[in-house]
Image (cartoon, grey):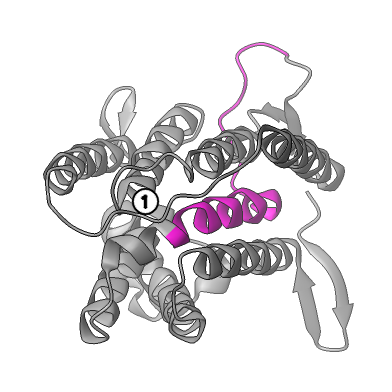
């Protein structure tokens, strides 16, 4: 798979970095639309997004170091900061971003759940696009399937493509759910649960440390996240608070939105295959 798009003198522009940047840009666009709709302070939301991205990178790296390969990094501590060599866990990134967001919103005396609902569809769309350039493939295929990717002479499961498709489906669910939420936090918790399910599905086609066969440490993390999110969902559902602002979306607008999402998903998958 082509990992470098092009070079500018001593600098190289990587495929993964490019699509991460595009994912962030798309996420910011969606976030801006939702912030306007919810009458949130756009400057505060923008600042929070920047802090959350930094926290996500730190959290993703720390989680990978501590959970996936602690023995190696104990022997090679200087490698911990070498994130350009890979080794980031999206689940750790979520932990880091949620922690910083909670602290920031508490300090600003803003509703965590209302703001989190604005972030939910933006995050999953960014994840879907960002996966296009990821070079972490799945395990070898037992049989020859036409959608497999051939890397170093082996036919592998395109784990990135699986996750791209699942994440676009989740984005469509959240986007269509915006006009039906009953309480603040519902959309964000649905995202947390939905993404954990997506990761659990894709994990069957990847190679990671096993807890007990065939379940990996990422499966265990996903299960814990789902249980915690489910408990929180049940708790805040019964809390009395501000009702979320309802959005009226016409069937025609929904149809157009869903067609755009479908086209985006197909284009993203085709783009992914064009680089391997």
Kindly state the secondary structure of the residue where label 1 is placed: helix
Q: Nearer the viewer, residue 59 or 140?
A: 59
- Residue found at x 46% / y 34%: 198
From the viewer's perspective, is 2 left or right of 23? right
Label 1 Cα crowd, 10 Å radius (few <14 / some 14-19 / many 20+):
many
Q: Nearer the viewer, residue 54 or 74?
A: 54
- Residue found at x 44% / y 74%: 40
Q: Quadrant of the C terminus?
A: top right
Does residue 88 show up?
Answer: no
- Residue found at x 73% / y 15%: 145
Q: x and y percent of residue 35 in the render?
A: 50, 69
Residue position for label 1: 188
From the viewer's perspective, is 27 left or right of 265? left
Question: What's drawn in magenta, residue-wise?
Answer: 118-144
Does residue 154 show up?
Answer: yes
From the viewer's perspective, is 28 left or right of 276? left
Q: Nearer the viewer, residue 117 or 129?
A: 117
Q: x and y percent of residue 264 in the render?
A: 76, 43
Instruction: Give the quadrant of residue 26.
Output: bottom right
Q: Nearer the viewer, residue 171 or 250?
A: 250
Q: Answer whether residue 121 is magenta in the image.
A: yes
């Amino acid at each position: 798979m082509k990992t470098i798009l092009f070079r500018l003198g001593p600098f190289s522009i990587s495929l993964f970095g490019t699509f991460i940047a595009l994912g962030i840009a798309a996420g910011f666009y969606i976030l801006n639309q939702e912030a306007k709709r919810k009458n949130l302070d756009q400057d505060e939301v923008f600042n929070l997004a920047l802090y959350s991205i930094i926290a996500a990178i730190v959290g993703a790296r720390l989680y990978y170091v501590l959970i996936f390969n602690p023995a190696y990094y104990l022997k090679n501590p200087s490698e911990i900061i070498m994130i350009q060599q890979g080794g980031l866990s999206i689940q750790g990134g979520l932990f880091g971003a949620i922690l910083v967001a909670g602290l920031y919103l508490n300090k600003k005396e803003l509703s965590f759940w209302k703001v989190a609902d604005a972030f939910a569809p933006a995050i999953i769309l960014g994840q879907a696009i960002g996966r296009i350039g990821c070079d972490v493939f799945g395990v070898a295929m037992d049989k020859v399937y036409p959608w497999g990717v051939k890397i170093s002479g082996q036919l592998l499961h395109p784990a990135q493509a699986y996750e791209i498709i699942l994440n676009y489906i989740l984005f469509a669910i959240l986007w269509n759910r915006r006009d039906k939420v009953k309480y603040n936090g519902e959309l964000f918790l649905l995202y947390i649960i939905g993404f954990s399910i997506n990761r659990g599905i894709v994990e069957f086609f990847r190679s990671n440390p096993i807890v007990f066969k065939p379940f990996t440490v990422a499966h265990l993390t996903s299960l814990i996240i789902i249980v915690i999110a489910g408990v929180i969902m049940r708790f805040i559902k019964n809390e009395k608070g501000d009702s979320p602002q309802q959005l009226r979306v016409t069937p025609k607008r929904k149809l157009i939105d869903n067609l755009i999402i479908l086209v985006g998903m197909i284009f993203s998958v085709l783009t992914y295959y064009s680089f391997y």
